[in-house]
Amino acid sequence: MQTFFLAVALGICFLVFLVLYRVVYGPGVFNRVAAISAVGTKTLIILLIVGFLYQRVDMFVDISIVYALLNFIGCVAVAKYLEMER
Amino acid sequence: MEVTLLVQAADESFTILEKARVRAVDLMNTAAKLTSETRWMEEKRVRAIFRGARESRAGLQNFVVTFVILFVFWALLSGKYDAFHLSLGVICTGVVAWMGHELIFHNVRAGDMRVIAWRFLKYIPWLFHEIVVSNFHVARLVLSPRLPIDPNLIRYRTKLESDTSMVTLANSITLTPGTITIAIENGEFIVHALDRKVADDLNAGAMEDQVAHIFMEADHIYIQDVLDVARIFAALR
Amino acid sequence: MIYRGEDIIIRTISRMLIPFIQLYGLYVIMHGHYSPGGGFQGGVILGASLILLLLAYGYQDAKSRVPEKLLTVFSGVGVFIYAGTGFLCLVLLGNFLDYAMLAKILHTDAAHARSLGILSVEIGVGMAVMAVMVSIFLDISTGGVLPGEEEEKQKTAEEA
């Protein structure tokens, strides 16, 4: 079971690198914002899988909830700022 | 010989027309009954609105329900159930519920909460089924080599009335793969659909009918339709 | 950042989520000794919930829930609780922040007194952090002048 979770975590890390292409080269700022939000979602999953690997799931669930929260609020804040500026 | 066949055919057509007439009269009777029931429910609802959600009784009910939901959330989060932590939980939940009790249930009429909650729980498996079906459809679209997508922005006027039901519909549309709600302006949804078939599913309005059924909205029988059919009704009678 | 939000979706979702976020922040403060968290982290989450309220509803509508004077009072009270606990231990003939001396007024043993002392210090820190974060957000996003004050200052300047 450990190796299965490790393989899944590495697979999702690879997907994060694919999305990072849009963060770096995305023409314009809206692509970058959406890509950062997607990276946040995958980070959440990787945190939970790492919790399984270390067999302390309860601790990592707390951290994941906080990260999901901050991802949401950050996305709303950046979107509001971009809307105001034009 | 031809005359008897003709008379027989005319006789059978007359019986068919008679059965159709009886059927139509039954339908019009049911429609009239439903209209009067709808009018009674409408009047009851208007009276409940003027009694208002700002009454102290509705405020207390909001506070108690918010307190219970938040305390269940606290008990799920905290794994320790001894007296010290539970009393801390009661104090914290009391503070949060007192400061924000009108936030979660903003304008719900007192007494509707149970019906809406039960219907919402019945809606979730249907939504899950819709998501699975859409997943297969979009996966088949995306994985085929020539990518037969046809992205369109659709403006979709909705019949829902309150904030909460519009947001529920918007979230359900976004959760279903193939469609994303972009904005809601003045009761009009702007939806980005991936494909012609998904757009047609959206315009058919099955999801909107389900959401309207949850929040008990838009269940009128429109008077103009009844009046239009009433002429035929009078002619049949 | 501070004008009225026009988006129904963000307004509705924010107002439904904010009590849960606040309760989660208080949970993180109270369980600092057992799971990751503590005073500062819980204060940040509470401040983030109030910032979400301000972002979604705009300053004019959310003004009644986040008044600036109350924020100043909160930050002062938070620091007062922290320093007050320390001084209370000093008054009871111990060192500064030596929570075992609190056992004299709480009538429990030293271990429980230390735990309750740390809990009160964390609550103070959480309150102060929440108030200061929302204050900083209001200062930066409005440029120092709140949107109701400009017209008031102009009116008093014209009347004088």
Image (cartoon, coloured by chain):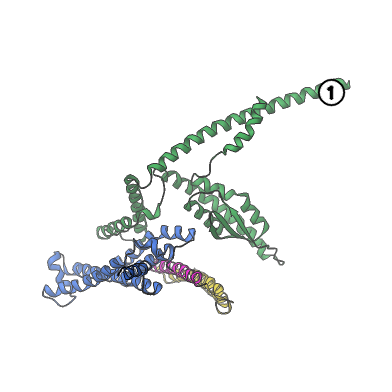
Chain colours: A yellow, B green, C blue
Range drawn in magenta:
A58-86
Which image quadrant is residue C122 in? bottom left
Please name the residue that numbered disc 1 is placed on. Answer: B6
Name the amino acid type tagged 1: Leu
Q: Is B99 left or right of B199, judged from the image as shown? A: left
Which image quadrant is residue B22 in? top right
B200 w.r.t. C144: above or below? above
B110 w.r.t. C112: above or below? above
Can residue B77 be seen here? The reply is yes
Please give the chain letter of the residue carrying mark 1. Answer: B
| Residue placed most toward the observer, C33 or C39 | C39
A58 w.r.t. B2: above or below? below
* Prevailing secondary structure of the magenta residues: helix
Q: Is C101 left or right of B143, judged from the image as shown? A: left
Q: Residue C38: percent from the left, percent from the top?
A: 31, 70
| Residue placed most toward the observer, B123 or C155 | C155
Residue A75 is one of the magenta-drawn residues: yes
Q: Residue C67: percent from the left, percent from the top?
A: 32, 65
Q: Residue A53: percent from the left, percent from the top?
A: 45, 71
Which image quadrant is residue A35 in? bottom right
| Residue placed most toward the observer, B6 or A5 | B6
C24 w.r.t. B161: above or below? below
